Amino acid sequence: MKRHASMVLCGLALWPVAAAAQPAAGNDQQQILGMRLFNQSCRVCHTKPTIISPQYGPVLSMDSLGGKADVIREVIANGTPRMPGFKHTYKPSDIAAIVSYIQTIPAPSEAPPATAAKPNASRDAD
């Protein structure tokens, strides 16, 4: 019983991560494969793993690289100066699946604007 409870708690703890990894729309086989490959190779740099860990690459979404599938495919295949290319790791159909999945990820919402003045700025002036 104790083991079952710990497995349930572990599953509940990982649920937000698994829910975030689901395609936003259109669960076709290509997007599911793309999500799996993204989680295998891309998530480590393109998502913030914990509160204290840094994020190395930009957040990816349907708006990445102007939302142009051919440009996203090119960057994944050939890489950039800061990112390895995956053309020797994945077949073109696998890269297309990753692109298909990325195009289902909603664009991140804007962060709230920072306040310009300190709350007690008028006291400091006296």
Image (cartoon, rainbow, N blue to C red):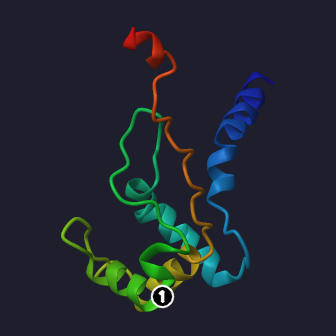
The residue lying at 48 percent from left, 66 percent from top is 60
- Quarter that holds the C terminus: top left
**Amino acid at the residue labelled 1:** Ala
Q: Quadrant of residue 91?
A: bottom left
Of residues 118 and 97, the one drawn nearer to the viewer in this rendering: 118
Q: Position of residue 112 (x, y in %)?
A: 57, 44
> Which residue is disc 1 drawn over?
69
| 25 lies left or right of 87 | right
Q: Position of residue 101 (x, y in %)?
A: 58, 75
Q: Is residue 6 above or below residue 101?
A: above
The residue lying at 77 percent from left, 31 percent from top is 4
- Quarter that holds the N terminus: top right
Q: Secondary structure at mark 1?
A: helix
The residue lying furthest to the front in this view is 126
Q: Position of residue 33 (x, y in %)?
A: 58, 76
Q: Position of residue 123 (x, y in %)?
A: 45, 10
Q: Is residue 6 above or below residue 82?
A: above
The residue lying at 42 percent from left, 78 percent from top is 65
Q: Quadrant of residue 31?
A: bottom right
Of residues 104 and 38, the one drawn nearer to the viewer in this rendering: 104
The residue lying furthest to the right in this view is 1
Q: Residues within 10 Å of mark 1 (few under 14, many from 20)?
A: some
The residue lying furthest to the left in this view is 81
